[in-house]
């Protein structure tokens, strides 16, 4: 019987309030606050050096905050042993022992969480099946591929049926299919186990597609948090990008420049064949402005290869909010 | 289901130290460095014994001295092996990125350290089992074998926990194996070189040893052990005269194990320099 079957879980499974941490004179974390609810998947984003790893290490009780407070399933951070019983963690870089098979590895960790050897083994087999590694249960983990190592890492994070699961860059180094499969597995964990999942990743389109909530960090500060839709909606949306054939670039730039609500049209930096169209503030509130821009190009018989409003994607929000905070 | 089945107690989870101990033991002995080190140890002892048995100049040495040298070699190299294995226990896990997973479990740090300590110590009985046949062969049935079989294991069993513990302390306080090994080997050399020099002086100049050199030997656990083995094997000294030389071999493990299990073990962190977690009593 699993923890979730026996104990009613709180809706808010993780609450962080004003977490601070400094390394000598350098402030690594300046008052991080957010809430994670059961069954929700929260994307934890930020450029390198933004304070993500420090935050995860504090929330997983590896490190102590200088100030602030957090609780997991209602348990204060002052009781790290009890919190460890309720969390599962896949660290960004984790090693596997050379001489253990997949099932021995999970049995070992199951026992460390207080299960008997037979119970730990049974749970280990269930988890191996859940992460798609049942066929390799008796293979040495040192023979596993990178994707399989990530999967067994996730299985290990689930041996104690956690309330909150921390996954630090689980898709790093995986091919696109592997990334997609793993993110599917992460979604399944949140949905089927009713666990709150914190997913640290640099794959912003994937985070946008699988996560319910998002926290964006920059220079140790939380610069945005909320549902993905809310956070995307809070940013400036008076830009758009249009891709036309290279030979039509000048014509398109001239035609678009004739529209009254267009402030300026420039080639998008680092994106050959793309134009970046900046609109005035009044146009940003006009729901038909995109139609007018496209109509202008169609009338001039300029082929439109691609079109995307800037600010309408998590990636744009991330770049806007973390500009200057990237180290 | 019978009534007896209903009354049978639910199976209990094994203590953490035992779980860690078995895992570490397996890591050491199945494809780990323990097996390699034991093979090297066996080879070294074999070469050493062969030289004593076949070299014409070494054959001139008194039998007691030959036995003393092979006992010292077996014990001191055995201690070195415990030290090296101990020096890999924590810093090695930090290097291999396996420590974080262990520290994220709700287990007592002290129990983790105890399991690792016992597995590092497992090499000592193995080295002793390998060494004893060499002592038997080289003693050629002489009564000196009795002193060798008593005091060799006593000295080694006293000091093996100390050396495994010193290695582990260096390992706990190092982020990688390099500094851990360097510190451990450095400390070993610091103790073994003066002890070997003092041993040489005792053998060659005997009665001329000064009070100061005796004091140094007494304070240095390996020096005192060397002297204890010398007195018991060469001079057939009774146990009542050997207690003085057992002082530092008894004190060293007491101090090392106290530091390991009372201070360093419970404050084990993912990285050296991280602040120890303040934990409220549950």
Image (spheres, rainbow, N blue to C red):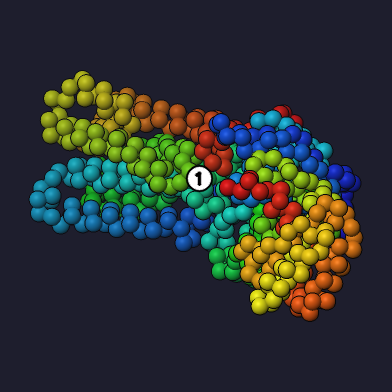
Chain of the residue under label 1: B
Q: Is residue B199 above or below residue B15?
A: above
Q: Nearer the viewer, residue A221 or B195?
A: A221
Query: What residue sits 41% from the left and 27% below the top?
Result: B251
Residue under the image location 43 percent in, 54 percent down: B34
Q: Position of residue B5 (x, y in %)?
A: 83, 54
Quadrant of residue B239 in the image? top left
Left or right of B23 in this view: A195: right
In depth, the one of B142 and B247 nearer the eye is: B247
Label 1: which residue? Answer: B90
**Residue A153: where, in percent of width, then height?**
65, 58
- SS for tag 1? loop
Q: Position of residue B163 (x, y in %)?
A: 40, 39
Residue drawn at point x = 77 percent, y = 67 percent: A256
Q: In the picture shown, does residue A160 fall above or below B260? A: below
Q: Residues within 10 Å of mark 1 (few under 14, many from 20)?
A: many
Which quadrant of the view contains residue A155? bottom right
Q: What residue is drawn where x is 38% and y is 50%?
A: B127
Q: Eyeballing the image, is B10 above or below B244? A: below
Quadrant that contains the N terminus of chain A: bottom right
Camera-side residue: A111 or B227? A111
Q: Is residue B114 visible?
A: no
Marks counted in the figure total 1
Residue B95 visible within the image: yes
Residue B214 spot, x, y in % from top left = 23, 24
In screen coordinates, is B102 left or right of B122?
right
Q: Residue furthest top?
A: B211
Q: Nearer the viewer, residue A216 or A109?
A: A216
């Amino acid at each position: 019987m699993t923890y979730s079957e026996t104990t009613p879980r709180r809706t808010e499974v993780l609450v962080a309030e004003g977490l601070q941490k400094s390394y000598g004179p350098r402030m690594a974390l300046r008052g991080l606050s957010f809430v994670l609810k059961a069954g929700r998947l929260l994307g934890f984003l930020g450029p390198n050096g933004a304070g993500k790893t420090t935050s995860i290490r504090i929330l997983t009780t590896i490190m102590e905050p200088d100030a602030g407070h957090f609780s997991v399933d209602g348990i204060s951070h002052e009781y790290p042993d009890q919190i460890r019983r309720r969390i599962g963690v896949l660290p960004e870089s984790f090693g596997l022992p050379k001489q253990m098979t997949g099932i021995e590895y999970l049995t070992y960790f199951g026992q460390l969480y207080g299960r008997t050897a037979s119970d730990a083994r049974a749970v280990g087999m269930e988890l191996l099946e859940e992460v798609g590694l049942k066929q390799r249960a008796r293979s040495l983990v040192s023979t596993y591929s990178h994707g399989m190592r990530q999967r067994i890492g996730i299985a290990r994070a689930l041996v104690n049926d956690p309330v909150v699961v921390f996954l630090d860059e689980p898709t790093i180094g995986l091919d696109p299919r592997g990334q997609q499969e793993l993110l599917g597995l992460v979604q399944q964990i949140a949905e089927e186990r009713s666990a709150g999942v914190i997913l640290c990743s640099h794959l912003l389109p994937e985070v946008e597609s699988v996560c319910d909530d998002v926290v964006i960090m920059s220079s140790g500060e939380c610069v945005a948090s909320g549902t993905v839709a809310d956070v995307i909606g809070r940013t400036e949306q008076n830009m758009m990008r249009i891709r036309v054939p290279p030979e039509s670039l000048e014509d398109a730039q001239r035609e678009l420049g004739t529209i009254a609500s267009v402030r300026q049209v420039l080639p998008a930096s680092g994106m050959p064949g793309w134009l970046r169209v900046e609109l005035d503030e009044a146009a940003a509130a006009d729901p038909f402005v995109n139609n007018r821009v496209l109509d202008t190009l169609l009338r001039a018989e300029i082929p439109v290869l691609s079109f995307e409003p800037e600010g309408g994607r998590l990636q744009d929000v991330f770049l806007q909010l973390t500009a200057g905070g990237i180290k | 289901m019978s009534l007896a089945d209903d009354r049978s107690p639910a199976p209990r989870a094994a203590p953490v130290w035992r779980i860690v101990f078995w895992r570490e033991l397996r890591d050491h002995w199945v494809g780990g460095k323990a097996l390699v080190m034991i093979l090297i140890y066996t080879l070294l002892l074999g070469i050493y014994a062969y030289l004593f048995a076949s070299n014409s100049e070494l054959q001139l040495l008194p039998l007691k001295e030959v036995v003393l040298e092979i006992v010292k070699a077996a014990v001191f190299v055995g201690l070195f092996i415990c030290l090296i294995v101990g020096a890999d226990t924590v810093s090695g896990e930090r290097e291999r990125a396996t420590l974080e997973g262990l520290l994220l479990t709700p287990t007592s740090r002290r129990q983790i350290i105890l399991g690792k300590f016992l597995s590092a110590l497992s090499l000592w009985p193995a080295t002793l089992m390998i060494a004893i046949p060499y002592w038997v062969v080289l003693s050629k049935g002489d009564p000196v074998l009795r002193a060798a079989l008593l005091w060799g294991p006593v000295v080694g069993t006293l000091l093996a926990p100390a050396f495994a513990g010193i290695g582990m302390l260096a390992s706990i306080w190092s982020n990688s194996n390099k500094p851990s090994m360097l510190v451990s080997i450095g400390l070993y050399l610091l103790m073994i070189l003066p002890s070997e020099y003092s041993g040489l002086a005792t053998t060659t100049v005997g009665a001329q040893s000064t009070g100061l050199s005796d004091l140094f030997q007494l304070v240095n656990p390996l020096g005192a052990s060397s002297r204890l083995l010398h007195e018991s094997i060469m001079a057939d000294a009774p146990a009542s005269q050997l207690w003085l030389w057992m002082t530092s071999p008894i004190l060293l493990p007491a101090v090392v194990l106290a530091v390991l299990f009372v201070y360093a073990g419970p404050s084990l962190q993912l990285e050296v320099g991280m602040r120890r977690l303040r934990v409220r009593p549950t």
